[in-house]
Image: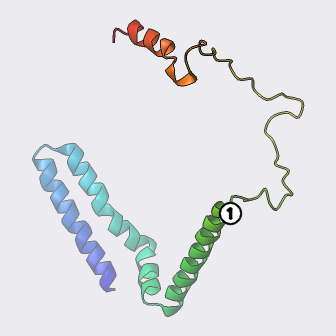
């Protein structure tokens, strides 16, 4: 009974603020405030407020929330352990991982890079990078 009265008062106050906002010619804001203020009234009319009030003061409901929290913690901890081991589902399926590619398809080919000149090592050949920088005027 008290929750319904509070929600109705909040809705009435919100509609009053929406009316004042509309009087100031801010119709978009007034419509948004009216929408927000009608939510508590709708919750009272659907009976959701009674359900929430009954749930908030029920020890069985709080025990249920505790069980759900425990299940969530167990799920996350098992996922973390599974990721640390690195096996995941591969270990349980015997190492055969299903492929999204057709069985007869070959692996993608890799582009062959130019070998460095005889006197230069692989880290010293920056001619490609220099060409790109010159192209962009840097």
- In the image, residue 114 sits, relative to residue 109, either above or below, namely above
Residue sitting at x 82%, y 62%: 92
SS class, disc 1: helix
- In the image, residue 19 sits, relative to residue 104, either above or below, namely below
Can you tell which quarter of the image residue 43 is in?
Answer: bottom left
Q: Position of residue 126 (x, y in %)?
A: 48, 16
Can you tell which quarter of the image residue 84 is in?
Answer: bottom right
**Number of numbered tags placed on the structure image:** 1
**Which of 63 and 131 lies nearest the eye of the viewer?**
131
| Residue placed furthest toward the left | 24
| Residue placed furthest toward the right | 104
In the image, taking residue 46 as reference, residue 113 lies left or right, namely right
Q: Position of residue 40 (x, y in %)?
A: 33, 68
| Residue placed furthest toward the front | 119
In the image, taking residue 107 as reference, residue 57 lies left or right, namely left
- Give the position of the N terminus as an image quadrant: bottom left
- In the image, residue 106 sits, relative to residue 64, either above or below, namely above
**Which of 105 and 110 lies nearest the eye of the viewer?**
110
Can you tell which quarter of the image residue 37 is in?
Answer: bottom left
Q: Position of residue 120 (x, y in %)?
A: 55, 17
Residue sitting at x 20%, y 44%: 27
Q: How is the image coloured?
A: rainbow
- Give the position of the C terminus as an image quadrant: top left
The residue carrying pointer 1 sits among few (fewer than 14), some (14 to 19) or many (20 or more) residues within 10 Å by Cα, namely few
Read off the residue under disc 1: 85
Q: Position of residue 23 (x, y in %)?
A: 11, 49
In the image, taking residue 113 as reference, residue 23 lies left or right, namely left
Residue sitting at x 59%, y 12%: 117
Residue sitting at x 52%, y 17%: 125
- In the image, residue 118 sits, relative to residue 98, either above or below, namely above
């Amino acid at each position: 009974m008290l929750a319904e009265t509070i929600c109705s008062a909040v809705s009435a106050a919100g509609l009053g603020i929406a009316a004042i906002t509309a009087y100031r010619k801010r119709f978009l804001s007034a419509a948004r405030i009216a929408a927000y203020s009608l939510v508590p009234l709708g919750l009272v009319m659907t009976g959701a407020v009674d359900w929430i009030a009954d749930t908030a003061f029920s020890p069985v409901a709080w025990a249920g929330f505790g069980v759900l929290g425990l299940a969530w913690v167990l799920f996350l901890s098992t996922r973390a352990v599974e990721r640390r081991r690195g096996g995941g589902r591969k270990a349980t399926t015997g190492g055969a991982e299903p492929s999204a590619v057709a069985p007869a398809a070959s692996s993608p080919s890799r582009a062959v890079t130019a070998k460095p000149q005889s006197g230069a090592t692989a880290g010293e050949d920056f001619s490609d990078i220099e060409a790109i920088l010159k192209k962009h005027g840097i």
